[in-house]
Amino acid sequence: SVTDLLKPTIDYLIKKGKKVGVLNVHLYRPFSEKYFFRVFPKTVKRIAVLDRTKEPGNLGEPLYTDVRSLFYGKKDTPLIIGGRYGLSSKDTKPEDLIAVYENLERNEPKDHFTISITDDVTFHSLPPSAPVDVTPEGTYEAVFYGIGSDGTVGANKNSIKIIGDTTDLYSQAYFAYDSKKSGGVTISHLRFGKNPIHLPSYVSNPDFVACHVPSYLDKYDMLKGIKKNGTFLLNSIWDKNEVLNHIPSSMKRIMAQQQVKFYIIDATEIAKQVGLPGRTNSIMQSAFFKVTNIIPYEKAVENMKQAVEKTYGKKGEDIVKKNYNAIDKGSEVIEIPVNPEWKNLPDEKREGEKYPEFIEKVMIPINSLKGDDLPVSAFASREDGTFPAGTTQYEKRGIAVDVPEWNPEFCIQCNLCSFVCPHAAIRPFLLDEKEVAGIPASTKLLKAIGKGVENYQYKIQVSVLDCTGCGNCADICSGKKGVKALNMKPLESQQEEVERWKWFDKNVKYKKI
């Protein structure tokens, strides 16, 4: 699986004067000695065998032991070492493979090594070499950050088809997901170029980065590795005068240092206007073709509309027209000037909360998409792979654009909102006199209604940072006099609810009625 990446890596090393090569085994178990030695160069002095498996208790991994057995008893046997790569879909990069060749050049090469990880417990890992770019010349690389169920992945698959079918460019795509069924992070890695692309790895140095979810700005290091004169496209819920107030200093610094072109488009609002709330995919896809000009924009729009007709034609003309409108409005991108003075901006100082050790050392890096950087020691005492229970209380992703606001005047205390919430982010509370005395300022309460609760006060409390903005609660709310008690409001307007939720969660006890 890694040989496609080894080939351009070897070409890079040969240009540097290294005498290296790769032998790819296609037929295994039965393993052919005849065919192996037919292609094996007799001048080879050292061999590193890579296995994508781990066999605890064995003398070595399968291919490694078989290759050693081939040379048993033969004269001028080369030095043979073995190592592991790619377990659990760990991404292997060119610099990891170069580290294998550098290991072979040592006076005493490390045997039974691992690559792509930092093993600071048994110290079997090989540190990667300096980053290298083995991408074929003229290849355009793009990375898209989306959220599960927003259509980003589907739109990018269509983009690959459009470019592959209508141009003479080769194309490649990889898609990374987290474990959530929907509402999780999705990252699309796309490559286009005039030469065949054999790179089974994620994009590390993109020409283009798109952020489809505004709340990702201060969560993920999206511009890491972006190329000089690259492009950054943001789905922004803020206008051109406000957006810079929400861009982290670290991101501004990279944009200035790399002379990045910065564009925004309010795809969230456009999706609402055209009748497709939450479906920003067609808008952002159209904006991608507008700012990159990989193919003429008019041609891209035509092909996108053909794809819409094919995909949604059976759902009716109304759905097709809405998607057509979304595609047309994707051209409404606005370029934001990048200030060269941002080059020296310091990072903002953040004083976060104190969390348990596991949350600090393992969960927070994983949620920041930096889990690949964790050393083996981070999992000490958790060799069986178990995680402590109740870790979601620390996640607080804050991914919703709009969250519910409770208006007690129209609440009938039916609790259906809490019943339909798929993430338990909206909950009813009953407070006794002692609890009422300590509530945060400006907290609205209702006198509880129903048998056995006459002495309590009632409150619907929303955890706005856990809410995903699905709107189920507002949809189910019956309210009074035709007015709902729950209405969706921008997340920024509900920041007071963050601390209020913490207080209710900590101080209000369960009541036995």
Image (cartoon, helix red, strand yellow):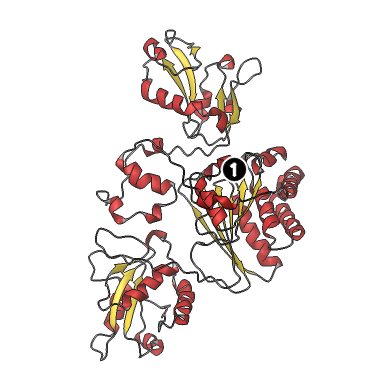
119 left or right, relative to 267: left
Task: From this view, report whether residue 95 is shown above or below residue 182.
Answer: below
Seen from the viewer's position, the closer of residues 173 and 13 is 13
Residue 403, quarter of the rendered image: top right
Quadrant of the frame with the C terminus: top left
Q: x, y (%) of residue 214?
A: 57, 43
Q: Secondary structure at mark 1?
A: helix
Task: From this view, report whether residue 290 is shown above or below residue 433.
Answer: below
Q: Is residue 85 visible?
A: yes
Quadrant of the frame with the N terminus: bottom left
Label 1 amino acid? Leu
Seen from the viewer's position, the closer of residues 129 and 456 is 129
Seen from the viewer's position, the closer of residues 89 and 260 is 260
261 left or right, relative to 325: left
Mark 1 Cα-neighbour bin, 10 Å: few <14, some 14–19, many ≥20: some
Q: Is residue 222 visible?
A: no
Seen from the viewer's position, the closer of residues 226 and 64 is 226
Residue 350, quarter of the rendered image: top left
Q: Which residue is mark 1?
A: 244
Identify the residue shown where x is 30% and y is 78%: 66
502 left or right, relative to 241: left
Q: x, y (%) of residue 418?
A: 49, 26
Q: x, y (%) of residue 113?
A: 29, 68
Residue 131, quarter of the rendered image: bottom left
Identify the residue shown where x is 37% and y is 25%: 506
